[in-house]
Amino acid sequence: MSNPLLTSWDTPHGVPPFDRISDEDFAPAFEIALAEHLKEIGHIAENPEPASFANTIEAMEGAGESLDRVLSVFFSVAGADSNEARQALQRDFSPKLAAHSSKIYANERLFARISDLWERRDTLGLSDEEMRVLYLTHRGFVRAGAALEGEQAERMKAIKSRLAVLGTQFTQNLLKDEAEWVMPLEEADLEGLPAFVVDGARSAGDALGKDGPVVTLSRSLIVPFLQFSPRRDLREKAFRAWAARGANGGETDNRDIAAEVLALREERAGLLGYEDFAHFKLEPEMAGEPDRVRELLTQVWTPARAAAMADAAEMEEMMRADGVNGPLQAWDWRYYAEKRRKKLHDLDEAELKPYLQLERMIEAAFACAKRLFGLEFAPLDVPLYHPDCRAWEVTRDGRHLAVLVADYFARSSKRSGAWCSAMRMQAKRPVEKTPIVVNVCNFAKPPEGQPALLSYDDARTLFHEFGHALHQMLSDVEFGSVAGTSVARDFVELPSQLYEHWLEVPEVLAEFATHAETGEPMPKDLLDKVLAAANFDMGFQTVEYVASALVDLELHSGAAPADPMAKQAEVLAGIGMPEAIVMRHATPHFAHVFAGDGYSSGYYSYMWSEVMDADAFEAFEEAGDAFDPATAKRLEAFILSRGGSDEAQALYEGFRGRMPGVEALLKGRGLAA
């Protein structure tokens, strides 16, 4: 019991005692917690009393407390601060967790109790949320294969175990590719780069122990390099390395893993009686089935492609003026788009960036949350898993609501991208718990003593992940299984994408976009340029996203392709993918889809949610105030506080009175006819 992961935590608000936890603690704590959870499940299944909601469903909600604590701590550090020991533990834990889950879903007595309650549901006097939790529990068991028997049941266990191993391997291969590629820069190679890019390259070199500046595959460094470097040869070298992640041959190549994952998913869906994995995966989502997803993506693809092709023609003319012959290439797009933005909007990222200080953007996100929902954020001095992390206590009217942990800077031990997770979900039953929420980003870390400066895309990412955090922090439900972001995959991005809109509210930028050196607010003419250019290059952004979403959908529709790369090429050719644009996430580094089941057949979710977020922000615009109290109150009451306690469509209609069409999205992206 000396293992800190298994003892009670006397820390402020139950934040894990990271200063007392070592990598050696995880494996023994994991094994003990696994056994404890199975024992708890066994007691529920073998209970001689007739099944009731309290002794079965609510009891299951309370089971596995130790396992949740161990895993929440472990996966927080494994994703954001990996090392060889943690990677080895991930490889060990993944199949064991899959087997553990299979044991629970294969427990015939437990499933019989759940099925009995489901059959008698209308006689149990359940509240709406209790009925919802019973429904989701029963559906989850059925979709996990609880009704399968004999060889089919055993095969389902084997598939899940193998998929868990492959997902971990895919993630670790990608992390290794990203961590190992470095492009050293000579002083002459820095010519033409803004100071913030040079500083980022020097800081990255220092962090890696290199003698001089470097470009890495961190998005916060490679994207501005591609935007500003006049060296076409270096842009090509960097871009090709970025695009080739997971497809470099050797031990870290993910192409065979993707093929096996797709085949196993198809088999899994077949065992459950579905025609393909896309139909299986989309059944519980708002979209419901693949054709509705195709319809949405096609509606957006056509105007987006037209806009991108028109932009490409203009940029090719700019290339020719620079004496560059041949077609526009993928490593040219960002460079000439930046030049074009400066030409059209007189807006220069290098001029803009000093006004987007990380600290001020954090303040802006907090201030908007205070005006909208009355939240207060106070720094919290607690040990965390990395020196770059920081924490705040979140309160309202003096009452503790949550803890927010943030980890903003890129490092080689952190997987790419940005995400929000929870070390603890909100719940009232069977034990009351307040959430501990984590926001992780990959912003370029500045040299010692200098402020961290963000690109506009970085600032939007900060607001996006904070929107997810609000969904967790404002959760107010009875049961943890439906708390916070535990919603349909194509609904989960609504709060995050909606919150991005507040970054573009003029009064927010006017107050918080202050110059890093002078402290002066962003000049009105620059502010006007920023807002006028909000939809600049939207054809490119939409095309790279929609192409990825369509490829994801088609990889999981019909028979699994033996060669996913050939299928990817076929889909892109079929939709007329512009030659100078690549998918945002090509198959070998499409972690959303292949690192786990999360966004498989579901990458479209960002756009499905955007249809709603564009319409939802219009509710504030219609009220005449981006901070309208009545609209904010409805948003919290029907969406942010409710988690998955009702169907997503019912929640949205409760807030807005109706479901939106695609028009608001096209208008918001500047793609409307």
Image (cartoon, rainbow, N blue to C red):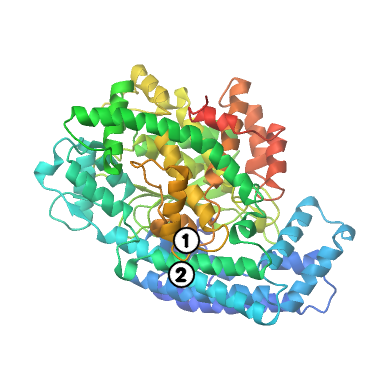
Q: How far across and how far down the image is residue 585, in percent?
A: 41, 51
The residue tagged 1 is 594
Q: How far across and how far down the image is residue 267, in percent?
A: 59, 69
Label 1 SS:
helix
**Structural distance between the alpha carbons of marks 2 and 1:** 8 Å
Q: Quick one: label 2 or label 1, which is nearer the N terminus?
A: 2
Residue that appears at 30% across and 70% down: 250
Instruction: Answer above or below: position of 289 versus 112.
Output: above
Mark 1: few/some/many CA within 10 Å (<14, 14-19, 20+): many
Mark carried by residue 667: none
Q: Image quadrant of residue 608? A: top right
Label 2 SS:
helix
Q: Are marks 2 and 1 in contact (CB under 8 Å)?
A: yes
The residue tagged 2 is 166
Callout 1 amino acid: Phe
Residue that appears at 43% across and 68% down: 257
Front position in the image: 7 or 188: 188
In the displayed structure image, the side of residue 549 where residue 656 appears, left or right: right
Instruction: Answer above or below: position of 3 versus 625.
Output: below
